[in-house]
Amino acid sequence: MPPAFPERAAWGTASSLRAWQQQALEAYFGPDGSAQGPRDFLTVATPGAGKTTFALRLARELLERRIVVAITIICPTEHLKRQWAEAAARVGIKIDPEYQNGQGAVGREFHGIAVTYATVAARPPLHRNRTEARKTLVIFDEVHHAGDGLSWGDAVREAFEPAARRLALSGTPFRTDVNPIPFVQYEEGPDGIRRSRADYTYGYGPALADGVVRPVIFLAYAGEMRWRTRAGDEITATLGEPLTQDQTAQAWRAALDPKGDWIGQVLAAADRRLTELRRAIPDAGGLVIATDHETARAYAKMLRAVSGQGATIVLSDDPGASKKIKQFADSDDRWMVAVRMVSEGVDIPRLAVGVYATSTSTPLFFAQAIGRFVRARRRGETASVFLPSVPTLMGHAAEMETERDHVLDRPVREDGLDDDLLAEANRQRDTPDAVGEELAFETVEASATFDRILYDGGEFGMQAAPGSAEEEEFLGIPGLLEPEQVGQLLRKRQADQIARERKTKTGDPRQDRTAAEDLHALRKELNGLVGAWSHRTGQPHGVIHTELRRSCGGPPLAQASGPEVRRRIEKIREWAARRRT
């Protein structure tokens, strides 16, 4: 059964199911549809694939078979409650999104309610009584939130242990802590580590191959940062070059500071990219994900200056946030700036350009944020996300197609930047730490440089100044392309760049080259070899990069050192030599 193209059905209203949704239903009810289905079922599907449509089709089937007579939907946010209720209404299921703990009985006209995890945690006995009174299907939207704290997990377990059926949904089941998620099964692997087990999984890679989601082009920006410490010392560092963890955190903060030029130059580039996409996608919109309220407002002013249009600002404590999101979704306005409010679950299919202007670096948040841009409406639409050249983010971008599970039995902290330290670095202080002292951090200068593009496990492009012809070549990539066409065009533009560079060089091509430029050259060489190997074998670039990592060890290409890249170059040449013989 093919995906619903050429036009995407309205959210939650598809009359025919996509292939994965039909397969997931068969996994639940059996191939002939006659089975009663399990009590617990975890569906992991990439953001934008249509988890809501699947869940509501399953709910309707369970209601019609009288396996359940009531539905409770648990959501991360207030906005999502109303979104679920609207989608359910389109398929004949009446959900009350305004239910409160003090309300008591649910109106007879409703099949059930939509509440937040926080609402359940406030009065778990109330929800347990409701669940025991009627045969209930409980739908956990983004179920990883049930593990946000031990108290929340205990509350969810207490409230819904008596449920007749439980359907857990997630686009990203992994967490960066080791709190078990209620009603999720964990299995111990050969290494003795327990991992979550999904009953049905539909990852970004298969969804991209099916045309259900858009390909994402990541545009990374480096740059020179200078800041002043509390002691008055000035420190200079280049974002995108090897730095210590503390230096990276400080340089990242300087880049996002509205007082510097970096964020303004990146927003201007993102707006030019949005203009290009709107040639093919007239209502394409952009989203800036900001760290806090103050910077969100500053970014909105910058966007007005570069685009000539005001930006919608959505703040986490704004009671009108849901209304603003819906108005933006229904309009053809260019930009929205938000603080976390649209990091997951919010459906704005026209979003096609993103700016990742936040210091949050967990894989969970990154995947949910990027999920806002991958929702496809018709074949050929592409998405573009601008982000700082920070190793952690580069690693997340390079592993977009990796399917992850929630892992227990491991240290809480992972490799890479520490989110707690970054949160502390970005915490707003209204006064200096002590009388007479300067603030601990002050941005002196921050300028941007186009660094590279990440796509399909590979890297493309060479460093260029904002506004240069080299940058414009990548910003001007057409907005309607098939995934394989995106790769072909990126490889051609990179080859053109390298050819021009060779023409302008005199003498030793390695003369006066920095360590960063050496690493760039090695990456370009590896990407060229991967492209040639892909042409010979028919394997996707991402698959080849993954196999090289498996053979040679080390992190994703975006984080690999010079020696690690050289080992991969030698390995792929070894493969080519063996194939010739």
Image (tube, helix red, strand yellow):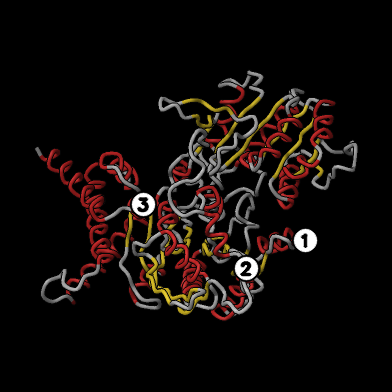
For image coordinates 52% across by 62% down, the residue present is 356
**In the picture, residue 16 is in which quadrant?**
top right
- Residue furthest top as drawn: 35
Residue type, mark 1 in image:
Pro
Q: Is residue 423 above or below residue 129?
A: below
> Which residue in the protein does label 2 denote?
428
Label disc, if present, on residue 319 of the rendered structure: 1
Q: Position of residue 73 (x, y in %)?
A: 73, 39
What residue is disc 3 on?
A: 484
Q: Earlier in the sequence, mark 2 or mark 3?
A: 2
Look at label 3 and name its amino acid: Glu
Q: Quadrant of residue 316?
A: bottom right
Q: Quadrant of the C terminus?
A: top left
Give how far across and how far down residue 547 sits, in percent.
Answer: 29, 40
Q: Is residue 352 above or below residue 133?
A: below
Q: Secondary structure at mark 2?
A: loop
45 left or right of 166?
left
Q: Residue at x 31, y 48 (%)?
A: 541
**In this rendering, the label closer to the viewer, 2 or 3:** 2
Residue ID at (64%, 43%): 148
Kind of element beneath mark 3: helix
